[in-house]
Structures are given as C-alpha cells and as structure tokens.
Amino acid sequence: MPDTRLTPAPSAAVATDSPAGGRILMCAPDHFEVSYAINPWMRPDRWKEEGALLGARSTNGWELLAATLRDLGVELEFAVPHAGLPDMVFTANAAVVLDGKALVATFRHPQRQGETAVFRRTFDALKQRGLLTEVHDMPEGVVLEGAGDCVWDPVRRTFWLGYGQRSDQAAAAVVRDLFGFEVEALELVDPRFYHMDTCLCPLNGGEVLYFPGAFSAEGNARIRERFGAENLIVAPEPDACTLAVNAVNVGRDIVLATASPALRGMLTERGYTVHETPISDFGLSGGSAFCLTLKLDRKSK
Ligand code: ARG
C-alpha cells in the first residue's frame, strides 16, 4: 500500500484564500535517481558512478528551489515520495490542474505508470482538505503526462498540449471537454524536447519563451499566429539544452536552473526578474524547474 500522506501545510489555509504567489505541489527527491532511460538526457550509467554525489547535490538544489519559491510568496504542498518511483519528483507530470479540477496523469512508459495511482491518492487528499474540488481520471488507453505536456497560457486562456513523444493527441479532446477551454495540440518533433514544458513556456505578460526546433513547421506557424511576433522570446539552443525553457513564472519572477546572459537579457528587457537555482542535476533525468512543480490553484480568470 503506497504511502500517500501529505505533509501538513505550514498554515491551515482555506481553499478560497490563495497565497500571493500561488500554491504549488512538489515532491522531495528522497528516491530520485536515474535508474532507467526514457528520454535522451537520462544516463543511468553516469548515475551509477556518481550517484551519492548527484543525489546529495540534487536534494540540496531541490531545497533551494523550494526556498526560492517560498520567498516569492508561494505556499508549498508535498506529495510523499515513493520508493521505486524516482520520477515522482517531477510533479508537473502528476496532473493537469485548473479551476480546482485535477485531471490525473497517465504515463507512456511502464517505469512511470505506477505514479498514476499514487498521485490519484495525493489529489484525493488535497480535495479532502478543500484545496481541490474535483479529481478526474483519464479515459482508459489515453496518455496525458499532466501539466508537463499540457501547459496553460494565462493570457489566451488556452492549453498548449504536446503530443508525439509521450502524450496522445487524443488527450486534447479530454482536456477541452473537462476544463472547457481551447487546446492547441502541437506535435513535438525533437526527442530532446519530449514534453511540452521543455520547449514552451507561456509567460504572465503574454509572451512565450520557446525553442522553435522542438516543433514542426506547422506548430511553429501556430505559435507565431497565436502569440504574435512581438511576444516571441526564442531560447538560444544552448539554453534550451540546459532546459531553461522549463521555467516557473510567478508574477514577474522567473525561476529556472541557469540562463545565459543572452537569455537573461531578453527576459529582463521584458520586465522579468530571473532567479537561478542549482537544480541542474535534475537535467540528468531530463527535468528542471517547471517539471519539479505543479500549480494547484491555477485559475482561468
Ligand atoms: N525522467 C523524467 C521522464 O523522462 C523527467 C520528467 C520531466 N518532467 C517534465 N515535466 N518535463 O519522464
């Protein structure tokens, strides 16, 4: 029986009063490791050699990420880590959450499929505490790896769904029907950018930070059309490869692993403050800041 207790919230918050920086679900990296390879970044051999060091560094980085988010006014909730599910730390993949409704994820690879039942219990517990109103499951046979592949654009009130590597295109209709908002489903064509949140990050000011090489010509046309040329912030390839697009945007603050001076310049020019956190070791699993978080109180308006 998996342990799905949630650690108590620091203050007994009521569902209606959202903390200034929002409420985010994280999962401590107690069991985090790279023991299998389901994306091109994952190198179990390297982890085997340096596991102790990498484990200590990633835990430290995760704690600093949590501290940075708290400093920005975010209230954190924690899913209980589960032995044998090392990727649970990437809570962005746990569900799609909007307006109090959670749609629990399903996973492409057997290595992660055990997470569905564990996260289902996590969300049921959050509902019991009044932090969610509804918890839904995906229809049988349809894969949607949570917010990692279904990113919310707060300005256009549209989901951007990535398919072709992990999630199914058919998930778009499920999301549209449940949440009642438009879903732009784009094919992900580069295996390095296997989840939508590795290559597209809509920002609160209406801009999008993205890496065009991850999308087909058609997808790129759609991004340009929906966001408008003036809102496009193209991540340089080296930044895309350190997963800088996988960023958490809280108000006008952007939390990420590392940003080159060029990328930092593009973001500060638009009025954002960039916060680097030492979470690069999660890159050895193909994850970064956004992957390690899931916004629980996201509202459509
Ligand atoms: N090792 C994990 C996987 O390949 C990393 C997931 C990162 N999460 C994300 N939302 N991009 O599934």
Image (spheres, rainbow, N blue to C red):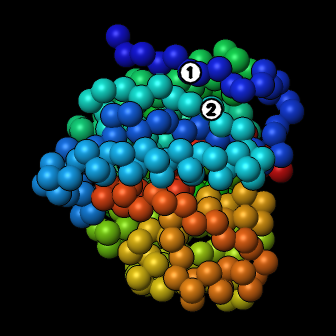
Q: Which mark is residue 6?
A: 1
Is residue 215 in view? no
In the depicted structure, whether residue 61 falls above or below residue 99: below
Residue type indicated by callout 1: Leu
Quarter-wise, where is residue 299 in the image?
top right
Q: Tell me the crowding category of disc 2: few under 14, some 14 to 19, or many 20 or more residues within 10 angstroms, Cα based.
A: many
Mark 2 vs 1, N-terminal side: 1
Q: Tell me the crowding category of disc 1: few under 14, some 14 to 19, or many 20 or more residues within 10 angstroms, Cα based.
A: some
How far across and how far down the image is residue 178, in percent?
Answer: 62, 39
Q: Which residue has dot 2 on it? A: 77
How far across and how far down the image is residue 281, in percent?
Answer: 37, 57
From this viewpoint, which residue is outermost toward the right? 17
Disc 2: residue Cβ within 8 A of ligand 1's nearest atom: no
Disc 1 element: loop
275 or 210, which is in the foreground? 275
Q: Which mark is residue 269?
A: none
